[in-house]
Every structure is written in structure tokens, then in C-alpha cells.
Image (spheres, rainbow, N blue to C red):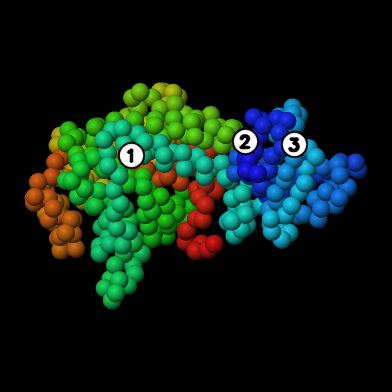
Amino acid sequence: MQRILSAHLPTRTGTTVRIAGWVHRRRLLKSVAFLIVRDATGLTQVVVTDPAVRAAVTALPEETVVEVVGTVTANGTAPAGVELTHPTVRPLGPPAVPPPFDLYRPALTATLPTQLDHAPVALRHPTRAAALRIAAAAVAGFRATLDTHDFVEVHTPKVVATSTESGANVFALDWFGRPAYLAQSPQFYKQLMVGVFERVYEVGPVFRAEPHDTVRHLAQYTSLDAELGFVDDHRDVMAVLRDTLAGMLAEVARRAGGAVATLGLTLPEVPAEIPAVHFTEALRIAGAPPDEPDLAPAHERTLGEWARATHGSDFLFVTGYPMAKRPFYTHPDPARPAYSNGFDLLFRGLELVTGGQRLHRHADYLAALAARGEPVEPYAGYVDAFRHGMPPHGGFAIGLERFVARLVGAANVREVTAFPRDLHRLTP
């Protein structure tokens, strides 16, 4: 008999079916027992009245994997409006050792460190699993939207010979006796691939050895990167980013509607044109000194509140960051060279995306590196490509975990990360 998932049971009323999953909860009453079985699509209520079956159910701790054969019977109070009656129950493994928290409760009451220590079972909780389903749907939307915009998916190395961001916060490793590093981003490679396909994207891990121990930083996270050629300036990149975000949220609604409902979310609207302010104006709105070189988290929160109150938008572009705070490959604003043709996108008062126009002339790269006192040699393989003709181009990168955390209202990015890696955590 073919296994049926819980979500499909309402179409099988009156038939005998086989389900399988985990013992989510047992309620042992005087004359009847209720066994709740969890599978990937939801919960099934099993009604047990036979004394022998009841005795078997009594001996099955929560999280034991079982198979149940029974009759699908309508019951408006049961999950999905049906339940299984006249069941037989067969364990598919030994009795499970219960985890150190109750997965059947509406919310996990264990501390986040405890959940992370026991991630393989904590992730089974519907709320934790829902966040990961939303992440998967968001990635599917990212890919689908860029596919329709004629982008090509690429896969670039995660072990590199030099750091991407001209900084020291990289993870060093031994590559057959030579120094190498885990990639901070696919930045160099996605730019080079613009010379091949014009429009490219990548979904992959990036590594930052930054000693941050905050609720918004991870040492490894998933980056959703895109790069496109033949742009006029950074505003062309912002337009593609706007469409990408709208596509991601539409796919979350389509693919992960159940997860959205589980978490009680209202998905944000992406405006047809996301409001934008220049960095200098952003400082004024945030009440920051005019010579501030960057936005602090408190400034971002104030700007998020302003965007919501003034424009009714959960999203806000801040453009024209000072060149001094942008990587060397960033294109300056031709009208105001101290400022960049770059941007950040704030989502509900949190920096979500960094992007902008890049340099595309070989001579400009040599000048930019010289101005920062950087030698050319470590970047030779990258910079040399610009001698062979590259179009004006730009791109952006979205931090997946940060996006999902903000979307679901998680207080800590680790709540929406399956197995987070940070300053203190290398297992499980």
C-alpha cells in the first residue's frame, strides 16, 4: 500500500490508507487514545480504541518513527478535518530517546543555545521548519525571477588565492602547501562572468572571519548574488533588485503558504518603485552628524521607521555611500567623486542588500588600488580581465538568513539558520 502524506488525506475519506511519520504527541484517555503523527506536510490524528493497539501506543515515546494503517474518517475538529480510525500501528525503528524539549508545544520553550546544541531535532518543530521552508521558497523565487530576466546561474570557487574585500577578516587554509582563503564573496568571479554571459547569478556560501558576536552576523551564510552588464549606472541594478525581491516574496506566498500561516506572517508589499534617499539625506533623517562615514544600526532603524511613516514602505534604498567605505572596485559618482554609485537596501530598518555599479576600465582599477595603497599583484588575475573589454556593469548580494530573519520577525539570525557557524559554534 502506497504511503499517503497527511496533506493528501482529505481526498481519501472513507478509504484505508498507510501513513508514516514521527510520534508528535500522545493523549491517553480512559477509553480512547489519540496518537498525533507528524510528517513533512503536517499532522494526522489517529484514534485508538483497541486495547492491544492502545498498549502499543503507550510504549511509543514522542519522536519514535511509526507506520499507521487506518480508515480516513471525517472529523471537523481534527487536523485538516479528517482522522484515522480502526488503526494498526507499527514502529519503524526502536523507541526514540525524547529530546530535551517538547516538540508538540506551540512554541519551543528551550533557550536558543539549547536548540542549537540539539539542532537535528529542534528543527523538527513546525516553527523552526517553517522558517527553512520560507528560505527555500525565497531562493526558488530568486532563481526564477532572474531566469526570466535572462540571467545565467554560475558556480564559482569557494577557495581563493586572495581576499575579495581587501581586508584581513578571512579564513586562511593550507592549499597543498600554498596559502589560500575561504571566499568572502563571489564578487570577482561574478564580475568576470559578466564578460561571458552578460547577466549572471549565484547562490552559495560565503565566509567572513569577522569577530562579530551579534544577533545579525554569521561567520558563514548563504549569499544570493547577481551581476549584470551594460548598465547606465547603479539605478539599473536597483531596478533588477526590486523585481527580484518581488519575485522572491511571490514565491514564498506560492510555495510556502503553509509556513507563512504557521508563523502568522503578513508578507510585505514591494513598491513598484522603492523609495530612495542619498546617504547625505539619510544622515539628516537619522539625526546623525553630517560627517558620519557610515550608518549605524540605530540609524538604519530610524530610517526604516521613516520609510514606513513617509512612504508606507518596508524597503528603502540608501544611495551614494562615501567611496572611503566602499570596496576598491566600486564606481564613484561622476558628479560627486567622493560618493559612490553604490547603495544599500534596508528592509524594516536593517541592511539587507549591498550593491552598486563597478569599475569596468583597466586603468581605473590600477588607479583605485594605487589610491588605497594596495599592490596589484594579489589581484592580477582579476584586474587583467579588464584589459580585454568589459562593459559597464553592477550587481548586488542578498544575505539569505538575514532576509528570512527579518521577514519572520526572528530576534536572532540563528533562529532561521539550520546549523549556524559563528565565533563560538562549529557543531553540530
Residue at 68% x, 53% y: name it: 65
The answer to whether residue 297 is seen in the rendering is no
Badge 2 density bin: few <14, some 14–19, many ≥20, Cα 10 Å: some
Read off the residue under disc 1: 344
The quadrant holding residue 167 is bottom left
In this rendering, position of residue 217 left or right of residue 390: right
The quadrant holding residue 299 is top left
| Mark 2 or 3, nearer chain start | 2
Foreground tag (1 vs 3): 3
The answer to whether residue 413 is seen in the rendering is yes
- Between 405 and 229, the one lying in front of the other is 229
Q: Which dot marks residue 71?
A: 3
| Quarter of the figure that contains the N terminus | top right
How many numbered marks appear? 3
- Between 35 and 217, the one lying in front of the other is 35
Cα separation between marks 2 and 3:
15 Å
Read off the residue under disc 2: 7
| Mark 2 or 1, nearer chain start | 2
Pinpoint residue 78: horizontal percent, then vertical percent: 74, 33
Asked if the residue at tag 1 contacts the one at tag 2, i.e. Cβ–Cβ closer than 8 Å, the answer is no
Q: Pick out the residue farthest to the bottom.
A: 177
Foreground tag (2 vs 3): 3
Pinpoint residue 93: horizontal percent, then vertical percent: 69, 59
Cα separation between marks 2 and 1:
41 Å
Asked if the residue at tag 3 contacts the one at tag 2, i.e. Cβ–Cβ closer than 8 Å, the answer is no
In this rendering, the answer to whether 360 lies above or below 235 is below
Residue at 39% x, 32% y: name it: 247
